[in-house]
Image (cartoon, grey):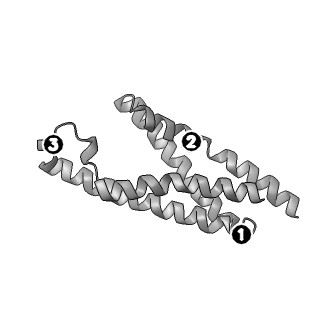
Amino acid sequence: MTVFRIVTIIFGLIPLYFGVVGIVAGAAGLVPEPELYSLPDITALDNQYRYLSGIYIGISAMLFYSAGDIVGRAPLFQMAVLAIFIGGIARVISYLSVGQPPLWQIGGMILELGAPILLFWQAKLLEAQS
């Protein structure tokens, strides 16, 4: 179980990092021309981007908290992984509708779509506990 806890914490560091960076930097780094950053559509995008970055931090908190009691907090862990997986599906929809994102976002998509593997691992640990 210790390895599972460590993996959960490491997995939780990823959305924490992107959440903090997203809140601090906003969407400015994603806008190709800085003079476009003040347009109403871009400010709305930045607002939504920072909000969703806060959600990333919330998901990290769920993962960190659930790592403390894998058995007792299993439903919380499962909901966090479900949210991450749904985010991965949203990235696939974006990929198919808008086009290929940068490689680092493809990497995120792969991790998000692979997150349910952690649920199978957790189920094996829970089974072993009972």
Mark 2 touches mark 3? (CB < 8 Å):
no
Mark 3 touches mark 1? (CB < 8 Å):
no
Residue behind mark 1: 69
Q: How many neighbours does mark 1 have within 10 angstroms: few (below 14), some (14-19), or many (20 or more)?
A: few
Residue behind mark 2: 111
Residue depicted at x 37% and y 31%: 97
Q: Looking at the image, is mark 2 or mark 3 earlier in the sequence? A: 3
Corner quadrant of residue 81: bottom right
Going by the numbered disc 2, the residue's amino acid type is Leu
Instruction: Please name whichever residue, 36 or 97, is drawn nearer the observer in this view of the structure.
Output: 36
Disc assigned to residue 34 = 3
Give percent across and percent down for residue 56. 46, 57
Could you tell me which quadrant the C terminus lies in? bottom right
Q: Looking at the image, is mark 2 or mark 1 earlier in the sequence? A: 1
Corner quadrant of residue 105: top left
Q: How far apart are marks 3 and 1 (CA)?
A: 46 Å
Q: Indicate whether 93 appears above or below 53.
A: above
Question: Can residue 81 be seen from the camera position used here?
Answer: no
Q: In this view, does 64 lie to the left or right of 124?
A: left
Secondary structure beneath label 3: helix
Give percent across and percent down for residue 70. 72, 65
Going by the numbered disc 3, the residue's amino acid type is Pro
Q: Looking at the image, is mark 3 or mark 1 earlier in the sequence? A: 3
Residue depicted at x 33% and y 59%: 23
Q: Indicate whether 2 appears above or below 100.
A: below
Q: How far apart are marks 2 and 3 (CA)?
A: 31 Å
Instruction: Please name whichever residue, 120 or 27, is drawn nearer the observer in this view of the structure.
Output: 27
